[in-house]
Amino acid sequence: MSDSGRSVLEVQDVHTYYGESHVLHGVSLTVAAGQVVTILGRNGMGKTTLIRSVIGFTPARRGSIHFKGRDVTRWPPFRTVELGMGLVPQGRRVFPSLSVRENLEVAGRGNDGGWTLERVYSLFPRLKERAVNRANKLSGGEQQMLAIGRALMTNPELLLMDEPTEGLAPLLVREVGATIARLKREGLSILLVEQNLPMALSVADHVHVLSRGQIVHSSSPEELARNHDVQSRYLGV
Ligand SMILES: Nc1ncnc2c1ncn2[C@@H]1O[C@H](COP(=O)(O)OP(=O)(O)OP(=O)(O)O)[C@@H](O)[C@H]1O
Ligand SMILES: [Mg+2]
């Protein structure tokens, strides 16, 4: 349990399977309100599976997930999103044939919370310039902004971000980092999956390293930055 305030997300001893394949082996972590918690780990270690279990695409078979004090372990994604989870999926997955504005409007439909088209455009002015362009005409960096903007349009309290810097040039990686820092300042809680260690360390309040479906290291970012043994053993640094 975190000592830094009310927890928004509590993952307790989660075991997740794809059919008979046992992928998560008892994962536990907490995200306190307003925190950025980062999951690091090499390819195939279970990071996306953890995100899928939290939001409900692949529910945990054992263990529990509490969000804002509610047991959401077996809730379908539409209900966890309704309660305030927002997903920025790995690979961005924007609707390619819809325009930027349509991608955002589809996500915002039926919501009357704090995030509007104009607010997303003020966070990402580039998206306003590209508003009528089809999403498949955007650069990778622009698509990532759109994926983040789309998640924000659902008015999340907890943002789940799965490798938002994957495939981006260094300048854009820094931009995504700055966006995460800004969203945190605006009060969002964030569970971030990253493979970019410097970026993860720069924005995180707390870091966990996942290996073969288990958390093998948890610490402050400062401590992980100093821990070259964990870095070389589990992150290939
Ligand atoms: N739909 C699926 N069906 C069966 N096995 C899967 C499925 N999705 C993932 N796996 C397996 O589960 C394990 C964890 O995969 P996962 O996608 O969670 O890893 P990851 O840490 O997100 O990797 P990456 O960094 O490459 O995105 C891998 O062995 C993967 O092959
Ligand atoms: Mg993944």
Image: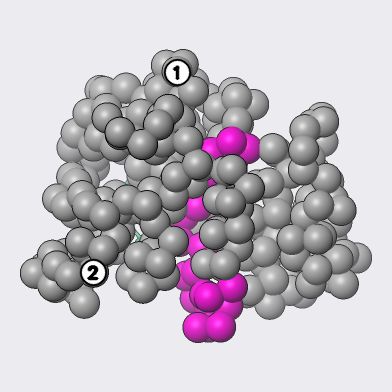
Foreground residue, 104 or 185? Answer: 185
Q: Is residue 157 visible?
A: yes
Residue 21 x/y as whole percent? 22, 39
**How is colour applied across the structure in the image?**
one colour
Query: For residue 43, which quarter of the picture?
Result: bottom left
Foreground residue, 223 or 117? Answer: 223
Based on the picture, tell me whether residue 37 belongs to the magenta stretch: no
View extreme (front): residue? 4
Q: Which residue is mark 1?
A: 69
Q: Secondary structure at mark 2?
A: helix
Foreground residue, 142 or 203? Answer: 203
Answer few, some or many: residues within 10 Å of disc 1's Cα (few below 14, many 20 plus, some between 14 and 19). few
- Which region shows up in magenta? 156-175
Residue 38 x/y as whole percent? 37, 53
Question: Relative to 157, is 49 on the left or the right?
Answer: left
Answer few, some or many: residues within 10 Å of disc 2's Cα (few below 14, many 20 plus, some between 14 and 19). some
Residue at horizontal 40 percent and vertical 31 percent from the top:
5
Residue type at the position of mark 1: Gly
Q: Which residue is mark 2?
A: 225
Foreground residue, 3 or 214? Answer: 3
Q: Is residue 57 visible?
A: no
Asked if disc 2 and disc 1 are in contact, CB closer than 8 Å, the reply is no
Residue 82 x/y as whole percent? 64, 26
Q: Is residue 163 above or below residue 64?
A: below
Q: Is residue 67 above or below residue 123?
A: above
Q: Secondary structure at mark 1?
A: loop
